[in-house]
Image (cartoon, rainbow, N blue to C red):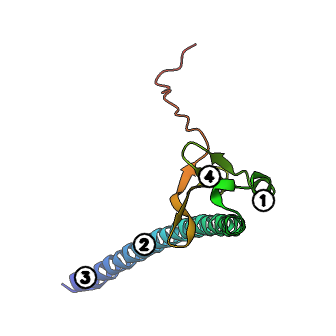
Amino acid sequence: MNENKRQAPFVNVGSSLLLVVFLLMCLITFATLSFSSARSDESFSQRIADRKSEYYAASNEAERLLSQIDRLLDVADPADLDFAAIDSLDADIAYDPDADTLSYQVKINDKQALDVVLALEETDGSHFRIEKWQTVTTRKWESDDKLKLMPIP
């Protein structure tokens, strides 16, 4: 009977050691997953911050051009628009005489631009009305519909 009592503590020590090793492996796994998740969240947040900064820089540039156009329209009558003065601005501004609009684009990044369209009309002391202030895609989307299911010799 003394032998049974001596074996019981050894079995208890072995099972508690296995439990500690299992818990340690679980903690290491969860720590690795948490670190990986935090790292991908940080990368995603940085990309979003970069995109927002690019958009606001382009928006500021579009506002600067809008201010210059407003100053030109203050000096001249919109009906007698001075296209030489508009051409002297730092942007490619297009005039559509049929719709009586001015339009220009400000590049945000390689894939997007800020598209601005101004309708020339006298309303409430202003010379124009903003018809469009929109982010548009400038790069053509190309799909890759090819699936390699079997290698063909």
Indicate which disc residue 30 carries: 2
Name which quarter of the figure residue 69 lies in. Answer: bottom right
- Seen at 55% across and 73% down, the residue is 125
**Residue of label 4:** 103
Q: Do the residues under discs 1 and 4 have CB atoms within 8 angstroms?
A: no
Q: Do the residues under discs 3 and 2 have CB atoms within 8 angstroms?
A: no
Measured in 3D between alpha carbons, the distance from the residue under mark 3 to the one under mark 2, in whole angstroms, is 33 Å
In x, y percent, where is residue 105?
A: 65, 53
User: Quick one: label 3 or label 2, which is nearer the N terminus?
Assistant: 3
User: Quick one: label 2 or label 4, which is nearer the N terminus?
Assistant: 2
Residue type for callout 4: Ser
Work out whether residue 43 or residue 12 is closer to the camera in this orientation and state it.
Answer: 43
Q: Locate residue 62 relative to residue 6 in the image: left or right.
A: right
Q: Locate residue 16 relative to residue 39 in the image: left or right.
A: left
Residue type for callout 2: Phe
Name which quarter of the figure residue 22 lies in. Answer: bottom left
User: Quick one: label 2 or label 1, which is nearer the N terminus?
Assistant: 2
Tell me if residue 50 comes above or below residue 132 in the rendering: below
**Residue of label 3:** 8
Measured in 3D between alpha carbons, the distance from the residue under mark 2 to the one under mark 4, in whole angstroms, is 54 Å
Of helix, strand and loop, which one carries label 3? helix
Name which quarter of the figure residue 74 lies in. Answer: bottom right
Indicate which disc residue 89 carries: 1
Residue type for callout 1: Leu
